[in-house]
Image: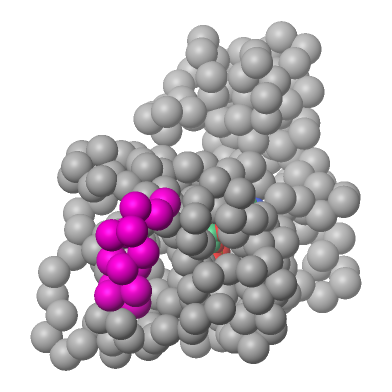
Amino acid sequence: MKVIAHPDEAHAQISHWRNSGARIGLVPTMGALHEGHLTLAKRSKAECDYTVVTIFVNPTQFGPNEDLSRYPRTLEADLAGLRDVQVDMVFTPTPEMLYPAGFSTYVEPPASANPLEGQCRPGHFRGVTTVVMKLFQILPATIAYFGQKDYQQLTVIKRMVEDLNVPIRVEGCPTIRESDGLAMSSRNRYLDAEQRQRALSLWHALQAAKQLYESGERNVHILEQAMARELLQRGAEKIDYARVVDSQTLETIDTIDDEAVALIACFVGKTRLIDNLVLSNSDSH
Ligand code: AMP
């Protein structure tokens, strides 16, 4: 497994592989890897000839009062996990390599970045679209894999790729959960035992929405009220949002006609957690 920090060196390696006609799979991450990340890498391994995982805690997607400095960094354990999965290359640039002095060009995110996370974390998606575009330039892969865990991020990136004619296919992968339903997340490491229990409130709230949906309820406000009630009863402390929106555009709806998605962001202690569930008739989620 090659571990490469320098963008030029990583680009040269990928270009070499691509010129031989190989399919390259790309899995961008911020490290502190868990089974969710490894599942993306395994999917890439199954579908591509070479798999590249990036580990970069991207400063431009963190707000001034967010957890950039305390975000978990576990490089050695991450590399061991990726070696087990037999990833071909890990790209580990430093912030100075991606944002050298004088850096000043950003990618303006699409409209789907405006609600939800966009409201609570101003500038977040501008940082995401910018770094993902940079990674796509440095590592011109065939397919890029992203998790549905970050549903809005996936929606934003799909739109960006389409709008800017980026020649990379974006694949969304299902959320990997702990056995009790908690979505795996690098930020779960912040939770103590009591908070870990309260973190399950997100899963229970999504299940409450799903049950109402399956019993025929299509009024979005009733679903949202049920989610908020469940979150607070089970110990979530501050709800940033608990919404049901159009699953494609993330626009506000009153009634579910087509497919919708329930999305939650809330705090447990100082830890901000997000999760989501697609509400559709096909029941593939
Ligand atoms: P992160 O390192 O948290 O920025 O995540 C890197 C990638 O892994 C993103 O595409 C995430 O959506 C994805 N991811 C994170 N957690 C999970 C999970 N529990 N299941 C599936 N994918 C995930």
Side (left or right) of 26 relative to 185: left
Helix, strand or loop: magenta stretch = helix
Quarter of the figure with the N terminus: bottom right
Q: How is the image coloured?
A: one colour
Q: Position of residue 31 (x, y in %)?
A: 56, 75
100 vs 200: above or below: below
Question: Quadrant for ligand 1?
Answer: bottom right
2 vs 279: above or below: below
Side (left or right) of 148 relative to 200: left
Answer with the quarter of the image where residue 134 lies: bottom left
Task: Inspect this view and state whether residue 152 appears.
Answer: no
Q: Is residue 220 magenta?
A: no
Task: Inspect this view and state whether residue 141 appears.
Answer: yes
- Residue at horizontal 28%, vertical 75%? 12
49 vs 168: above or below: below
Quarter of the figure with the C terminus: top right
Q: Position of residue 6 (x, y in %)?
A: 33, 86
169 vs 87: above or below: above
- Residue at horizontal 66%, vertical 62%? 38
Q: Is residue 11 magenta?
A: yes
- Residue at horizontal 25%, vertical 81%? 8
The residues colored magenta run 10-23
Q: Position of residue 165 (x, y in %)?
A: 19, 42
Of 244 and 1, which appears nearest the observer? Answer: 1
- Residue at horizontal 51%, vertical 42%? 172
What is the number of callouts on the image? 0
Q: Position of residue 79 (x, y in %)?
A: 62, 81
Of 17 and 204, which appears nearest the observer? Answer: 17
Side (left or right) of 180 relative to 102: right
